[in-house]
Amino acid sequence: MAEVKQIGGFTPSGVVYKATELPEATDKTHKDLGLSKQQLLEMYNQMFLQRRFEERSAQMYQKGKFGGFLHLYMGQEAISTAAVQVLNDDDDIITAYRDHGFGLVRGISAKAGMAELFGKATGCSNGKGGSMHFFNTKEHFWGGHAIVGAHIPLGTGIAFANKYQNNNRIAVTFFGDGAVDQGSFHESLNLANLWKLPVIYVVENNGYSMGTAVNRHTATEIYKRARAYDMKSDKVNGMDLFTMIEKFREVVDYVRENSEPYLLEVRTYRYRGHSMSDPATYRTKEELEEFHNIDPIERLKDYMTSHHVASKKEIQEITDKVEQEVLEAIDFADESDFPELEDIYNHVYAEDLDYNFIR
Amino acid sequence: MAELQFREAIRAAIREEMSRDDRVFIMGEEVAEYNGAYKVTQGLLDEFGGQRTIDTPISELGFAGIGVGAAMNGLRPIVEFMTFNFAVVGMDQIINNAAKIRYMSGGQVTLPIVFRGPNASAGQLAATHSVAYESLYSQYPGLKVIYASQPADAKGLLKSAIRDDNPIIFLESEQMYGMKQEVPDEDEYLIPIGKAAVKREGSDVTIVAHGKMYHVATQAAQQLAKDGVEVEIIDPRTIKPFDIETVVKSIQKTNRCVIVDESHPFCGVAAEVGFQIQREAFDYLDAPVQRVTLPDAPAPYAKNLFDAWFPSPKQVIEAVNTVTYRN
């Protein structure tokens, strides 16, 4: 763990030199991993779409185009991208409130995502959820959830239902390092291993639980917590796409084959503050710079050109296409209608507007 | 028809619905091997096996959430809380997740789940084991809340609840589990959620009383009848959605109303029902609506304090005397 200056009291405080230590990245090539040029370009497309969508979202937020909270995933895109690359399309994904990336790789279009941010009826949750509550259940994306740790039992329950129905699907529950201190995390891990549920708990350890560095909020390295529940676990470098794919394959195969849970701690980094109102004064410029230098998207681009997988031109074409796609999404969101006022009452109950509301 | 205890009526509803639909299962503390802390689930493990009758650890937050997740993903869980006093530990899953995920997803998620177990006081168990939760859960849009007072209602309403596509809070009572009543045994014996029942007809005063309070009201009504006061008792059965129409119809006849409610007074069920009555039946009232509730204090342990704390037939009679100006 990183060194922390102790100043006494109950909270270890002071300068955090480095929030999280990265495990080694894999030295495998795309060929070693059996990945085609097409797949690499597709993943570049997905990663850059997540990045550009959020950069533009931040601009739109600052322009006052929408309100609420906006938590950006930038820096962590290798994780969502590797997950959908490895998982079957009908495997289940649930995540916390930093959810745009997962939505975009699980079938939510840039248009439907941007419209949701703008609170429009055409949004992926009909304008009812906003940034923190993207959903696309048809493609097994069970949402963004905004009470820290509260969706960990949900992911466990989704896995329970898969096992009950014996459908060979697994459920992957993503959450931040801040969630591991909640009781819902511990109760879920205990129940999941007690009942041998096919669920992967993925901690996206981005170094900070809001503004509290990971070594100021967890008494042990996170992946070690699984040992208390006799559960398999490991840590992995989340800044490198190939490393994530390699590790996810191993974990997904294990969980599907054995119907057993697994705790995977992914070490990663978020470039922006916790939310748009956070200037991130709790970390150093040097630390941010260090992670920018190993940016997963730049790394993939460099790999593709240096290994002659794709030309700069081919990559630029995708870059331009994504840029256009996001600009069109902004226009779409801007031009879409807000929900009808009657929609206040819609989707509260399964009966929708036929329920006998008190009015 | 067979005479069943309250617990047997609930068990019959669970058995019939589990037989009818493989997606229905029950989980909770001691529901399987122990045969239920209050024997509601007796025999279900033998009949349906451990795949569908599932013992949980004492882990309300965990298993309540697993229930919600399972409901999102195609199952129809019945989650038993040993009492609703313990459900408080898992309430985040009910109030933030079960009640709101359909809404926040723009209607993409359906959540057919029943949370059931005993509610409110059960004698001298002191403050944390004696809370009536119907007013609290009724506050949150997305939930339906049922609190039956008799075995036949319990069976018909629980069957409807298990078939309903919404998260439902189904409240029972340790003190009612042994009560007996003739209960229909046909498979399609369903009581609609949100419909009150006129359980005693009378022309002088309307009493609205649900759950255990229905029995307190009945005792008061018998006493009052000896004095020539005929009480009409409405058992709402479902707290949310609340059947105000049946109450208003009764008040149009009696012009007087007393609400008996096991909640504390502030923001309790009686507070909301009283408001709705003044709005919907103001012109029919010959006296202000009165209510009998718990005091604004937690449950005490000492016998004399507990007896004074718990709503009594005597208090109901006094309230009836007030609205009929017989004091």
Image (cartoon, grey):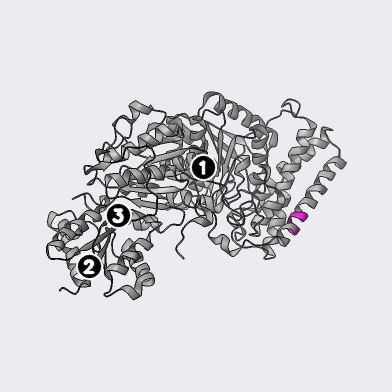
If the image is split into quadrants, where does the N terminus of chain A sit?
A: top right
Magenta-tinted stretch:
A327-331
Query: Which of the two residues, A241 or B5, is positioned nearer the viewer here?
Result: B5
To which residue does mark 2 refer?
B204
Kindly identify the amino acid type of the residue bearing the numbered disc 3.
Answer: Ala
Work out how far the residue at label 2 is from the one at label 3, CA to CA, in angstroms: 29 Å
What SS does tag 3 mark?
Answer: loop
Q: Which residue is mark 1?
A: B72
SS class, disc 2: loop
Q: Is residue A328 magenta?
A: yes
Expressed as whole percent of the image width and height from the top left, the position of residue B183 reads 28, 41
Residue B84 is a magenta residue: no
Nearer the observer, disc 2 or disc 3?
2
Q: Quadrant of residue A247?
A: top right
Asked if residue B170 lies left or right of residue A273, the reply is left
Under tag 1, what secondary structure? helix
- Choose the circle earlier in sequence order: 2 or 3: 3
Q: Chain of mark 2?
A: B
Question: Which mark, residue B132?
Answer: 3
Does A345 sit left or right of A124 as displayed? left
Residue B216 vs residue A322, the one in the foreground: B216
* Residue A208 to residue A65: above or below: above
